[in-house]
Image (tube, grey):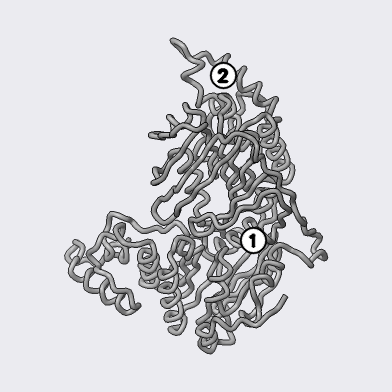
Amino acid sequence: MMSAISDRPSDRDAPEQSDVPVLELAGVSKSFGGVHALRSVDFTLRTGQIHGLVGENGAGKSTLMKIIAGLHHEFEGVMRMDGKEARFRSSRDALNAGIAMVHQELSIVPDLSVAENVFLGNQPTRGGLIDWKRMLREARSHLNGLGIEVDPRARIGSLSIGLQQLIEIARVLFSGARIIILDEPTSALSPPEVERLFALLRKLREKGKSFIFISHFLDDILRISDEVTIFRNGRKIVTSPNAGIDKLWVIDRMIGQGHEELGETYTGEFELKSQRNAPIVLRATGLAWQKALRNVSLDVRAGEILGIYGSMGCGVVELTRALFGKIKPHGVLALEGKPLKLTTTASARRLGMALVPESRRSMLFHHEPLYKNVTISILERISYLWLKPRIERDITDQQIGSLHIRTSGVNALLGHLSGGNQQKVALAKWLTHAPKVLILSEPTRGMDVGAKEDVVKIVRSLRDQGMAIVVASTEPETILSLADRVLVMKKGEIVREFANEMVSKDRLLEVA
């Protein structure tokens, strides 16, 4: 679908660009253990250009950016800067060549001043000591030159997220970067902060700086980019000038509808059937935390899988942490009709809550055997005067059988298992004490198709046993394959509920 876009006139005045790209990749491929993350990708960035990059999670965007930024140096194909072949061995090598990446999780040091963050690792010295006066003077001059008015002596952690982001961009510019990769730069920003960021990017574009702008917020991509590249399943699908294209055109190419020649099929619609007559097990009312959660209310019923979907940075992860007591939001939680006071995650577990987070590494011990990982959350129940490893092994053996964990046995080191089987171990850890509410954050991320199907079957089986389950994910396929009811989040708020109706993947993407 093509339609003219007339509400972005300020983004049509990009400077005239050189015939030689500042950055060019040709035929780039990258695999991890037999999984193809990138397949023969071509990509071009010109001087004074803001190039938008979009695609679903796992589409290959992050892998390509890590190659450009020097984090992956083993790859097939060619990368050139200013027409000359380049291959970086580290992020320091890339920065020395003029390439820097501003990650979604900012790398500022909150307890240091603005000036110290601008000069981080590169402080001016005099007589072997830091020259504080010069650092403050030059930081103020550098920031003012970019239109950023802030006291360089202020503690950076006391500033808004928007200002912190502008200062991080200022820091990478100060270090000499002329190509800047921005990863989800607007995910935690308010509308005025987005406008401030865009004003800075336009100003820097006019000075010849080049940007790769990665975002799940398609409105932002279409407002600021000169060109847009769409990725899907490790391939570059298309690069188009940002003129005469709209969100529906982009979504169509992101999800693959109309591109069956690549061997992919569109999954169509999913039927949602919510359990409206079942008792409410968990209820949240008016949850608010920093800028990540804004007046979020929900309930989840016995024998129901509540899906919470949104793009990266929308507040989905923070919501799962709030429900489990890892962060302390304003608002009210109730479990089975009684006020739920979560002072610690241990208290949440004792009350019948369980959280399998998006990062398996944060809750599992890769250098320990399976049985220690599975039973760690119930040690106080199975140990008397001393711990009996036989009991631990018996419990783990039961979980291996019920969850179909593929392993050589209870003594196998967790790190030797595949990602999908590690996720099953993470589930087993919590299922040893049958929680009332099970919260799953990105339960199938990074898994192959077979492992995903196993996890889906396990979660559905738990639902059929009457458990209340919350599945939070930025992957629409995961949500639609599991959920009975879906809440869509955007910038910290629930913006839509889908229940007892047919819902398609592109509809979720459009709303989010």
Cα–Cα gap, marks 2 and 1 = 44 Å
* Residue 302, quarter of picture: top right
Does 194 appear above or below 330? Answer: below
Q: Nearer the viewer, mark 2 or mark 1?
A: 1
Name the foreground residue: 301 vs 249: 301
Circle 1: residue type: Leu
Local secondary structure at mark 1 = helix
Say if residue 336 shows up in the picture.
yes
Q: Which residue sits at x=60%, y=74%?
A: 24
Does 496 appear above or below 408? Answer: below
Name the foreground residue: 337 vs 108: 337
Q: Which residue sits at x=44%, y=34%?
A: 340
The answer to whether 158 appears left or right of 393 in the picture is left
* Residue 157, quarter of picture: bottom left
Circle 2: residue type: Glu
Q: Which mark is residue 421?
A: none
Local secondary structure at mark 2 = helix
Q: Which residue is mark 1?
A: 509
Q: Name the outermost residue toward the bottom.
A: 16
Mark 1 residue crowding within 10 angstroms, few (<14) / some (14–19) / many (20+): many
Q: Which badge, 2 or 1, is on the more N-terminal residue?
A: 2
Q: Which residue is mark 2?
A: 392
Name the foreground residue: 7 vs 216: 7
